[in-house]
Amino acid sequence: MEKQFTIKIKNGRKYFYRFSLNQRFQHIFLFSTVITLVLTGMPLKFYDTRWAKPLYAIFGGINYTPVVHKVAGVLLLMLFVYHIGYLIYNFTVDEVKPLKAAGRLNLPSLLQAIMRQPMMPQWRDAKEILQLMKYLFFLTPERVAGDKYTWKEKFDYWAPFWGIVIIGSSGLIRWQKELFSHLFSGELINYAVIAHGDEALLAALFLFIWHFYNVHLSTMVFPMGTVFLTGYLSEEMMIHEHYGQYVEVMKQAGLEREIQPLPGSGDQHRARGPETAAPVGY
Amino acid sequence: MRMRDTRRSGSYAAFKIMLALLAAALAFPLTAFSAGGEIRTDTENCLICHRYPGMGRFDEAGVKRIYYINEMKFANSVHGKLKCTNCHVGLDKIPHTDIRKVDCTTQCHLKEPSTEREFSHTNMVEKYNHSVHGNSDPNNPKPFPEDLPTCTYCHDNSIRSPLEGVWGTSQALANETLSRCVGCHTKDHWAQNYYLHVTHRMRHLRSQAEIIKLCTSCHEDSEKMSRHGLDSIATFKDTFHWNLVKFKVKDAPDCISCHVPIGFTTHDIRPKYDQASSVNKRNRVNTCSNQGGIQSCHPGATDDFAGGRVHAYGTKAQLVVDGAQSIAVEADESLLSERARRDMSEREIMNFKILSYIRLFYKILIPMVIGFMVCHQTLDLLATLRKNRHNSH
């Protein structure tokens, strides 16, 4: 892995390291293929609309667009396989080997290690969502002090993960329908047709409403968050989204005195109540 | 004397050219075809009256009838060699009070070359009467016989297609082939007719979309279909096959690709439980995979593959799942539910249920996720605005 500073200071502003080059590469690969897949797939699902045919024509019409779609699909599945390998490799290096060295490699400890993984949903996430609800419904001025990966990131992660499994498998079935009919009954093709299109619609809407808002349209990041390119997140965004991690990293770096309070809270993120709120300028 | 003859034939040639030009202007798509051909003479003088485009009337039922005959179009149609009275039997009086409906089984005085007997369409009509569209069984007559298609419902006898599109799509190729015929068969028009007669059978005259339009003109009418115990064919337009037609894919599957595959004939379409049907379980794999070796859409198809559902499920599946009680007990609807119980196997019903559940799952999941996201983002925006206001104080 490449050496990175946890905090980088540029023009007097702090930037916090979040994503490795490997992860950023995976993400760019992921969204390039997904956008291609959405653009080449949706015209088939909505073939009766006005935009379907011109959009299809851009990719070469009926003769080439399906090929583009299949190539992009295969690339995405390759990324998926790579990502699973990446997870297994990291898990082996970070968890299995130390456990083995300590002589505590057994099923319970392994399960515990799996549950510790950053993307695993935890009880904390439910509490964070509850806290967020309170904040969004004006019940508290205090935003959630999110850790390195909040429930939002986990949502962003598991939604495509599940999506790739469903869309990928149903896509392969649709593509190689004759082959799959040697293994399964023909009705599976019918299910695959529906699941592929509907799950893809869900995924596309998810990406364009949820993820695009979070990383492009939200007032905090408009017109575009840059963390996916640089790997570093600005201090404001760190406070807004990952206050827990922010405090931790600042302490580790010996910058305890410079820690900014959580917006909406008192002198630290413990105290609450609007009357004690310290104004923080963005 | 010789001079006068020359002049006369010269003016006749000029007249011919003028006529040809006029015809070309009138029937533009035919120009390539009619050029050099001879115009058939109207030996029965029907065109004395029937050449006037305004000729027609509203019949007793209020239907507009047009009696105008475009000579050029007729001459180039599939029946161009026939006399009017070959098909329109009777017509001895003027006005034609003795008119009889045209019967395609009429012998039309042409010699059928293989038997040297008078030609008629009897063979096809007989075949057709035994097909799913016919009504041949007197013991088991079909309800609403007026719904069944007649010969002319599908055979609208538009002009023959232009010469192109047989082996390749160029007219040049057709001309090249024809140039070899006319070496011996010196009458151009005859050679063209013969060529068209043969090549007519070697191609689809209707595009996929046109075939679907023709079939759906009845089969999409759910009222008409249900009184015959059939699902409306809207179920086709919910398939990937239809997508291919929509996007004009070459050899995209239309109705006849599966229901009249190679080796079968349109006049003899059978119901699917008939073993002679191309979509009968026995023949289905062959229909999907290898149509006489000429066209193979799904070469590796298995029984399981062919067992999948091609059309989406329609009213029948719905009827069986909902139970016949909830259905109105009108005569035609009861026929539909009766047929539904016969046609829908346990397995099909289960398949339909699973499909419905998958659809339902996404019908709930998509609005839920989207609704949640939209709410969250709106509230988030409001919270940001509130915070900004708060901060500016």
Image: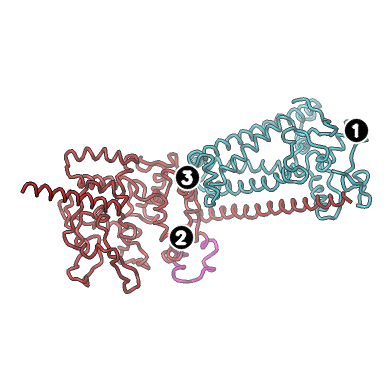
Chain colours: A cyan, B red
Report, in whole angstroms, how far the alpha carbon at label 1 lies from the one at label 2.
74 Å
Residue A255 image label: 1
Q: Report the residue marked by disc 2.
A: B231
> In the image, residue B208 lies at what x, y percent?
41, 50
- Position of B206 with respect to A93 (left or right) is left
Identify the subunit bearing mark 1: A
Nearer the viewer's eye, disc 1 or disc 3? Answer: 1
Q: Nearer the viewer, residue B2 or B258?
A: B2
Badges 1 and 3: C-beta atoms under 8 Å apart?
no
Q: Amino acid at mark 3?
A: Phe
Please tell me whether mark 2 sits on a helix, a strand or a loop. Answer: loop
Local crowd size for mark 3, using a 10 Å CA cut-off: few (<14), some (14–19), many (≥20)? many
Report, in whole angstroms, how far the alpha carbon at label 3 lies from the one at label 2.
22 Å
Q: Are marks 1 and 3 on the same chain?
A: no
> In the image, residue A72 lies at what x, y percent?
58, 36
Please tell me whether mark 3 sits on a helix, a strand or a loop. Answer: helix
Identify the subunit bearing mark 2: B
- Position of B248 with respect to B168 (left or right) is right
Q: Amino acid at mark 1?
A: Leu
Q: Residue at x 30, y 70 (%)?
A: B57
Local crowd size for mark 2, using a 10 Å CA cut-off: few (<14), some (14–19), many (≥20)? many
Predominant SS along the magenta part: helix
Q: Residue at x 71, y 33 (%)?
A: A24
Quadrant for residue B84, please give it.
bottom left
Nearer the viewer's eye, disc 3 or disc 2? Answer: 2
Whether residue B319 appears in magenta in the rendering, the answer is yes
Q: Report the residue marked by disc 3.
A: B305
Q: Amino acid at mark 2?
A: Asp
The magenta-colored residue range is B318-345
